[in-house]
Amino acid sequence: MARTRPPQTDRPDKENTPMSDPVSLLQQMIRFRGVNPPGNEGACVRHVAGLMESIGADVKLLGCDPERPNLVARVRGAGLAPPLLLHAHADVVPTDGQQWTHPPFEGNIIDGHVWGRGAIDMLGSLSMMVSALTRLHAGGAAPAGDVVLAVSPDEEAGSRAGAGYLVREHPELFDGIAHAVGEDGGAVLSCLPRRVHPIVVAEKRACWMRLTVRGRGGHASRQGWSGTSVGKLARLLARLEKGRLPTHVTPALDRMLDALAAAADEPLAGRLRALRDVDGKAEVPYDLLPEADAVYLDSVLRNTVNATIIRTPEKINMLPSEFSVDFDGRILPGGWTVDDFRTELRELIGPEGDLELLLEGDAMPPPVFGGFFDTIASVMREADPDGLALPMITPASTDARLFAGLGIACYGWVPMLLPAGSRYQDAMHAADEQVPVDAVRFGADRFHDLLLRYR
Ligand SMILES: [Zn+2]
């Protein structure tokens, strides 16, 4: 049930400068090939720095590697509101081994779509932000507070040289900033007959672990031993495959389910409402939802765990006496700790083996609603009265986790007017990444609205 509206064309002429056209900006950014690894973001970051300089912003290029700078550009505001941070990453993932219908680094427009690596993740969004800032300048309007644009490398490989470097080495550049808008990472839900506009208010964090299990080894010509490590592995994987960690309704999820249920028809509405009441054992209605929606809900209702790497001594004629399994665990936003996660994981997989923590992601503070969140929601409501602005949790993590550590309330938002049920996000990190030209223009207009409106 796709409902589309014509793109907004209410720009005064003086704001239509070539610099403020988000589509040509995006095409240019794709052509820079900022692939990470190895990290070729420099050309794109310097290009944006030049544009920001030309509109009078205070521009800084900073980094631990001169070839991979971060840009921090400050556009002066009227001093009536605290500074606002817009942040984006300039790196894109490789295209090796992927079959693309059209070349991934030419930024061509084909059938109304800009094609190329980064069109969605997240050069499209960066081009919207840059376009909104240059248009604001061309129109002679100053935002209520300073706007700080941070463009970073290295998000796709852990952010050490990117946003991690900025918050570690230059936190003073972000003093006084109350709110930030960055990468969205939300799900494009298609279970409603309306467009859903995600506003990400919370992120899960990584908790990567390794389990080492030992068992009886020996010559592989014999059969029937009990207590082999392979038998233990098989039972463990079966428990993981069938089981789930308990469900927990966090404040962000509660608001999301409430809004989703209010917009859904029965019987889905009732089943979504029921998820809010059952703590520990909530059942996601797979029978009523598109699979991708159900998987998303399943993943934000609980801490999750997937076995991703299994290691044994690789010897074909030997029963291994030891194996290890690496778990990609993700912890819900809120007060959950690694110990809580470990306890839940043990209940699922049993007491076998030694569990070792490999990596713990940064925790974000609780989501903040009202005020700035309402401003973003109102921008979307006015531009698309048929749509539903929805607070969301992302099961993955973005650079927001790093800026949140400076006390900034972070929101993930990429305003696009896509047909209801559109699955453009599925092309993130995959072949044939593309974005509708109209969606990019719409997004740039909404960032412009936000810059004029926030207080
Ligand atoms: Zn991204």
Image (cartoon, helix red, strand yellow):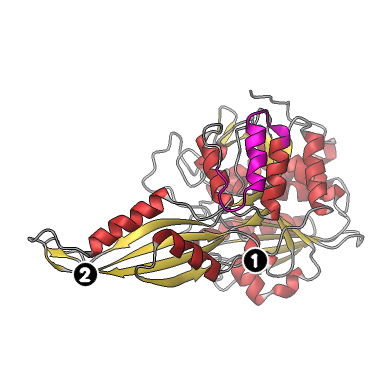
Image location (x, y in percent) of residue 333: 63, 60
Image location (x, y in percent) of residue 55: 78, 55
> Which of 71/1 is in front?
1
Q: Secondary structure at mark 2?
A: loop
| Residue carrying label 2 | 321
Image location (x, y in percent) of residue 239: 38, 54
Q: Is residue 325 left or right of residue 413?
A: left
Residue 335, numbered circle:
1
- Judge whether 112 appears above or below 117 on screen: above
State the quadrant of the C terminus. bottom right
Circle 1 residues within 10 Å: few <14, some 14–19, many ≥20: few
Q: Which residues are magenta?
A: 262-283
Image location (x, y in percent) of residue 389: 73, 40
Kind of residue sitting beneath label 2: Ser
Kind of residue sitting beneath label 1: Gly
Does residue 267 belong to the magenta stretch? yes
Does residue 388 belong to the magenta stretch? no
